[in-house]
Amino acid sequence: MSDFMIQIEHLHKTYRSGFLMKPKLALKDVSFSVEPGQVYGFIGPNGAGKSTTIKVLTGLLNFDSGKVLVNGISPRDAKSRRFIGYSPEQPYFYDYLTGRELLRFYGKLVGLDGTELESRIGWALELLHANKDWIDRRLRSYSKGMMQRVGIAQAILGKPKLLILDEPMSGLDPMGRRDVREAIQQLNRDGVTIFYSSHLLSDVESISHKVAMIVDGKIVREGTVDEITESCGVEYHVRTRKAILGEDLPQGVSLTGHPEEFVCEDDAARDRLLAYCLSNGIAVEKMDHKRPSLEDILTEEIARADA
Amino acid sequence: MQTLKHILIIAHNTFRESIRDKILYNIVFLAIALTLFSIVLGEWSVFDRSYVIKSTTLSVMSLSGLLISIFVGISLVQKEIQRRTVLTLLSKPISRVTFIVGKYFGLLAVIAVHLAILTCIFYTMLLAFHAEPTANLLLAIYLIFCEMAVVIAVALLFSSFSSTVLSALFTLGVYFAGHLSNQLLEQVRFASRMGEMGDTSTALFEKMAVVIHAVFPGLYRYNVTSYVVHNVALPDMYLFWNTVYALGYVGVFLAIASWWFSRRDFL
């Protein structure tokens, strides 16, 4: 067994479009790895290369150069997909089938049959809270949320070691998002490695062990949520009982707009402000530290890439 | 073994998808209507009624098979790509070759059922009108099936890399070229023998006719209507060699389709 469930090194992918086959570099030297048992979030703006990377992993896209391994096997080899469950963004299915018929079809393709197939379907539907009447209706009558649940259900039928989900929470209402989030966590507890892309950064922060941020085809940050946010520095918000005049403020400290509230840009500025308060007999009422959120960092990275 | 199972699952789903296609029903009902109309044609014609019913129905079988291959077959692969159902399907542990071969057999099963329905109607009509329902008509129907097996492979080949309209036009082109290539070669050689063309143009036209004859599948081989309606025996091993010939072309076309499909990116 491979040390990594996903291993990508120096991956490049170019799309060619139009009559002249004009090239557009979609992935530029992308490298990261996912260890077994991790929940790995993959975030970035639209068109950054998230779905392209996912489709390379699932063998739906060829790539120009680099090394891509899924559980130690190249995605160009159909064997690599024995370990994978995949649900695409906005999944589309054969709308002449019912949800249950569709799951039977995909279940057979991953080697399930008979009572084992039926029990796996029941289990998947239960996990996603989809064991309802609508599962026996034709897919053409499904809402986006129902389709999303069926999409994830077909992906987990074959007991995959690696579950790849492209925007699994898009189109879901808050209840649906909670169900999917809980399903991801449950599957992970059962030993499934999860690799997923999402725009919902609060969900990513809450459930991911590790996160990679991709902007304009390049990985700009990778690590745990703490590692990423700490690497961007911590701000301190201090409130005092007495106002401090602007010209008296220590270096690195600024007013927030309120004369008794200050922002310290780093640890040193915080220490300087506290020393100033101590020496001038100013009581400190409250002090919070604030890390930038993934959203702040992503916004900053997008602005940097645009610049 | 696993691959065979996957092919069967995809073929079954393709069959299920096709039989829900309205276009298929239109073609099947048109074919049935034309088959029944052959009775009226037999009455109007100066030829023997039995001859008219048999030759008309066999032609209807071939043409309706062609229409199914084009209108249902080509859209099968294109629909998978356009509706993006191919993304989920190809993320399963199946190769793209399996996908193409499964689609092929699914459509072949549709053609088989279509021909079986028309055959039942055909024999019922022949029995009802005492029009010599001989067993050798089944040989002609079998050869139509072989012809359609080649046409479906052609349709899948083109639909693996081009649009629906272009695939339909290319498939029609191959169908007509395959039916006319022998006649074209004979005509060019005849004109050459009769000295109706200059030396340069003779050589050029003959080479072109030889290339067309060699490259395109000789679908004219599968039209044995004139033999069977007149109860003329087919040459020995005719069925065997033409089955092998069809299998050869199907193999080559599916191999190229699979190779091309394997190189495709699915966005």
Image (cartoon, helix red, strand yellow):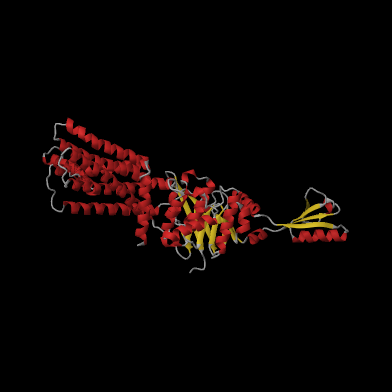
Q: Nearer the viewer, residue B191 or A3?
A: A3
Residue A218 lies, in percent from the top left, at: 55, 55
Residue at the extreme top: B44
Residue B68 lies, in percent from the top left, at: 31, 43
**Where, quadrant-wise, is the N terminus of chain B in this rendering?**
bottom left
Is residue B177 shown to the viewer in this render?
Answer: no
> Could you tell whether A146 is left or right of B119 in the image?
right
> Could you tell whether A177 is left or right of A141 in the image?
right
> Could you tell whether A207 is left or right of B121 in the image?
right
Q: Nearer the viewer, residue B221 or B43?
A: B43
Is residue B243 shown to the viewer in this render?
Answer: yes
Residue at the extreme right: A281
Residue A99 lies, in percent from the top left, at: 47, 50
> Could you tell whether B4 is left or right of A50 in the image?
left
The mark total stands at 0
Q: Nearer the viewer, residue A115 or A241?
A: A115
Q: Residue at x 19, y 54 (%)?
A: B240
Residue B132 lies, in percent from the top left, at: 14, 42
Q: Nearer the viewer, residue A278 or B99?
A: B99
Q: Residue at x 38, y 47 (%)?
A: B17
